[in-house]
Structure formats: C-alpha cells, structure tokens
Image (cartoon, rainbow, N blue to C red):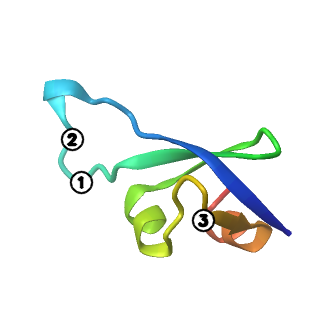
C-alpha cells in the first residue's frame, strides 16, 4: 500500500551540527498519522518529500 507524505521534519541541530560519523535523519509524517524516521540521504535519493508517496515495503526496508 502507498501512503502520501504530508510533512517532513528535519531536526534543528543549531550551531553544534552533527557529531563526526553521525548521519542526519528526517521524520516523514504520513497521511495515516504515522511518523517514520529515515536517513536524510535515503529520503533524498528516493524522492521522499512532502506530496510524495512511500510504500510499506519502503518503510520496512528503511528499518522501521
């Protein structure tokens, strides 16, 4: 099943940024009310953005 992404939340790490080796993550808010945390790079590569869609299989493969 496909779910529409209605919001994307990126953390604000301020001036501290990320620790060495830490990979940024984003939270996708889906139309069914779920929130799915994925690596920022994966979301970018797959085109998971507001208005896009994500499947159950994609969610499972992303580690959720």
Badge nearest the viewer, 3 or 1: 3
Q: Position of residue 52 (x, y in %)?
A: 61, 63
Find out whether the residues at labels 2 and 1 contact each other: C-beta distance under 8 Å. yes
Q: Quadrant of residue 29?
A: top right
Q: Is residue 32 left or right of residue 55?
A: right
Q: Position of residue 28 (x, y in %)?
A: 59, 47
Badge nearest the viewer, 3 or 2: 3
Q: Which mark is on residue 19?
A: 2
Quarter the N terminus occupies: bottom right
Q: Residues within 10 Å of mark 1 (few under 14, many from 20)?
A: few
Q: CA distance from mark 3 to mark 1?
A: 19 Å
Q: CA distance from mark 2 to mark 1?
A: 6 Å
Q: Is residue 37 left or right of residue 44?
A: right
Mark nearer the N terminus (3 vs 1) = 1
Mark nearer the N terminus (3 vs 2) = 2
Q: Which mark is on residue 21?
A: 1
Q: Residue furthest front?
A: 51
Q: Residue at x 50, y 73 (%)?
A: 46
- Residue at image mark 3: 62
């Amino acid at each position: 099943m496909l779910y529409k992404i209605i919001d994307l939340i990126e953390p604000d790490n301020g001036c501290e940024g990320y620790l060495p080796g830490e990979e940024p993550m984003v939270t996708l808010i889906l139309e069914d009310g779920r929130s799915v945390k994925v690596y920022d790079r994966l979301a970018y590569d797959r085109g998971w953005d507001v208005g896009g869609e994500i499947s159950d299989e994609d969610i499972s493969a992303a580690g959720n």
